[in-house]
Amino acid sequence: MKACLKRNAATVLVALAASCSAFAHEFWIAASPFDPGVDAPTVVTLNVGEFFVGDRVGVTSAHAKSVRVLSAQQDLDLMDLVPGGSMLPSLTLSFPEAGSHVIAYESHPSQLELPADKFHSYLHDEGLDAIIRQREAAGTAATPGRERFRRSAKALVRVGESLDATSTRNTGIRLEITPETDPLTAAAGDTLRFVLTFEGRPRPGVLIKAWHRQGRQTTLIRTTTDARGGFSVALPFTGMWMLNAVHMVPATDSGEVDWDSYWGSLTFELARRKSARS
């Protein structure tokens, strides 16, 4: 089954893509469509940007540490499809089994240095005021921010008409947003429940941003995780949503960076309101 799924589930496009952005902006997986039929293709892209507007990131083993697809039938490692000496603009996947699927991605670390004022603004925007206070207490608030960042991303894909509990599984990625209410069974207007974990442990007090974009209109909803890392959010619109969070800790193993940051995202497509369904 594993070899069969690899053959059916991943046909790689050949063109090269632009190199990965050096800036630690939001990072997410998009699928077109998010609801393919059995054995029908869906194009999976990696994206980085701000305000849910981004550029595609090339798929390459120089950036990707792990790419997996999880389903009720199996967990499949796709890294042998990811090139090392070049970049691919996307992966075209097809799935031989109906049900819920999770695409999970983790990156290698990248380094970034920002001027003190820009680093301060970035920390504040991402709800990392505790880091601002640590820099002030250490007398380093006026120094550049030297950061090493890693990205973790998931996308939920519905294949065919049947669903299962795969969407609510924890995949083990570093910073992970896991649904407790399955978005694939929800509709616009529903309140959904999630939990944020870092290395498997709940992360309280973390800013969560929920993004939606339709044409030129961008919607942003903010909330914060509770003591058990949980949060709930009512999502008012149909279509693609992206939830993201950032966790930062002091770097302890390098003289080149001062901070390690971890970026986590979850993308999915929300159905029409239940009252409007045919």
Image (cartoon, rainbow, N blue to C red):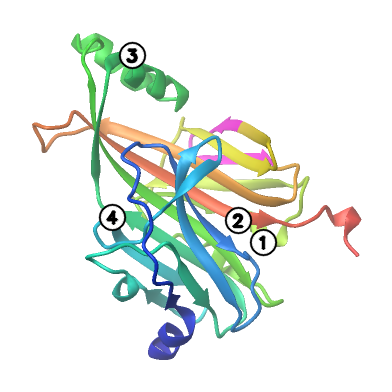
Q: What stretch is highlighted in magenta?
A: 222-234
- Would you identify the image quadrant in which residue 132 lies? top left
Distance, label 4 to label 3, CA atoms, is 28 Å
Work out whether 80 lies above or below 255.
below
Which residue does the numbered mark 3 point to in the structure image?
Answer: 117
Tag 2's secondary structure? strand
Residue at point 57%, 84% (across, down): 97
The amino acid type, in three-letter code, at marker 1 is Leu
Please report contact status of discs 1 and 2: CB closer than 8 Å, yes or no.
Answer: yes
Q: How crowded is mark 3: few (under 14 residues within 10 Å), some or many (20 or more)?
A: some
Q: Which mark is residue 225?
A: none
Left or right: 92, with 23 as reference point: right
Distance, label 3 to label 2, CA atoms, is 34 Å
Q: Select label 3 or label 2 by which is in front.
A: 3
**Nearest the camera: 259 or 31?**
31
**Residue 166 location, x and y as percent?**
54, 68
Counting residues from the start of the chain, the first of labels 4 and 3 encountered is: 4
Which residue does the numbered mark 2 point to in the structure image?
Answer: 268
Which residue does the numbered mark 4 point to in the structure image?
Answer: 63
Which residue does the numbered mark 1 point to in the structure image?
Answer: 184
The amino acid type, in three-letter code, at marker 4 is His
Residue at point 63%, 69% (across, down): 158
